[in-house]
Amino acid sequence: MHLFHRSRLRAAAVVSALALGAAACGGGGGDDDTAASDVGQQLSGPRLVLTTDEGLLVLDRDSLEPVATLPSEGFVRVNPAGDDRHVFVSTTEGFQLLDTGVEVEAHGDHSHYAVAGKPRLGETFEAPEPGHVTVHDGTTLLFSDGAGTIQELDTDDPTTVVDTVELSSPHHGVAVNLDGDLLHTEGTADERSTVVLRGADGTEKARTDDCTGVHGEATAADGVAVVGCEDGVVVVRDGEMTKIDSPDAYGRIGNQAGSSSSRVVLGDYKVDADAELERPERISLVDTESDEIRLVDLGTSYSFRSLGRGAAGEALVLGTDGALHVLDAESGDRLDTIDVLEPWREPLDWQKPRPTLHVDGDTAWVTDPSTRTLHEIDVASGAVVDSVTLPAVPNEIVSAG
């Protein structure tokens, strides 16, 4: 039974253009790949990938039409690979590459997307307990929590590992490429507090052990990176590290969202170390130029899947009040409040579906598991421009392209 439903119709010209693009269908992947089953026409726009209670769902990003479904077992996660075509799926075996089935074709001074085959699950890059995937400065890094290894790939061709770095001990960590330097965390499964910056030749350039419970990273303008700690953040700038303390003894900043057009990094902010699940109502804004942390009270709680950045560097937070809160990242002033969902409550189990925010440029997408709905929002105008009912309950969402 086809359960897809559109609540708003787009212009006929747009739909016609997408349908014409489907004629550019080409070949698929290798014999060992797992191909998708078709659930709609092979549209030629960039793609969205969602995890659902029934597997992986691939949508055309422009029309929100379903393109295909792919099988998956157990709880999986999705991460951008950084190019226009692929997404990494975190499974129990490692990071599996999902080819969304489109490619960018250049024609003189312009380019467009063309169908290159069905969406397809391909090679798995082995990684016990796959963790963070980061994309920066042309490099995609895959961090294995269970092995303490960092696999490096070329973002333009994320199909082959070009280098692997082995750390001294497995831990829940993260790594990011900073213009050829490797920024990464160190620690053990029981304790982690170290951030290290190494040059391309492996030489250590900077280190700090003053980042208790190190977790998460984001990059800002001018190649600056921020790593979260349980008592503040570490700012990495021009090969040096600066610790910025939280205003509270325990002021954990972990999940973050950066923007290349802003010197400020948006982060969460938690103050109860003993909470089974803290539902914070304040967010952090880390100024990487002044080395200051500004706390802003939203008046509503949010989850770890609630943070994003707009095209102009706006700080975006999806609140449990059902609204998308748009803030000026430098001042913390509220720019807009966009009503999207009914009020919701974050589940105790972090793997359970909850409303999730994903942003690319001026477009934000918000999932609503309770109604199996995906909403598309134009951040600049503050309008919910489209809403569709999905064929399964959505969990995570990511875009390719």
Image (tube, rainbow, N blue to C red):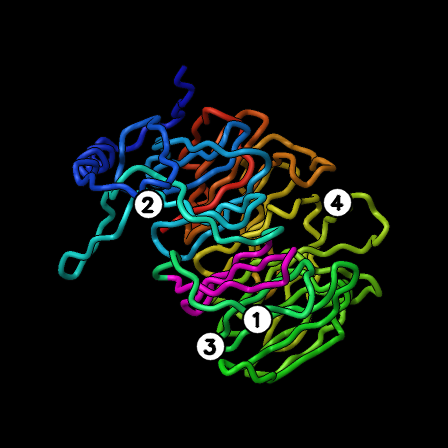
First reached walking from the N terminus: tag 2 or tag 1: 2
- Closer to viewer: mark 1 or mark 4: 1
Point out the stretch of residues depicted in magenta.
131-155
The single residue placed furthest to the top in the displayed view is 1
Q: Which mark is residue 180?
A: 3
Q: Secondary structure at mark 1?
A: strand
Identify which residue is drawn at 31% across, 44% down. Answer: 30
The amino acid on which the numbered mark 1 sits, given as a three-letter code, is: Ala
Read off the residue under disc 2. Answer: 46
Report the residue marked by disc 4. 279
Q: Earlier in the sequence, mark 3 or mark 2?
A: 2
Measured Cα–Cα span from mark 2 to mark 1: 28 Å
Q: CA distance from mark 3 to mark 4?
A: 38 Å
Q: CA distance from mark 3 to mark 1?
A: 13 Å
The x, y position of residue 74, in whole percent, is 59, 34
Choose mark 3 or mark 1, whichever is in front: 3
Residue 284 in the image: above or below residue 347: below
Between residues 164 and 171, which one lies in front from this camera angle?
164
- Residue 127 pos. (x, y %): 56, 54
Alpha carbons under labels 3 and 2: distance apart: 29 Å
Mark 2 or mark 4, whichever is nearer to me:
2
Quadrant in the rendering for residue 23 = top left
Distance between the alpha carbons at the discs numbered 2 and 4: 35 Å
Q: Which residue is mark 1?
A: 225
Could you tell me the amino acid type at mark 2?
Answer: Pro
Q: Are discs 2 and 1 less than 8 Å apart at CB?
A: no
- Residue at point 75% right, 45% down? 279
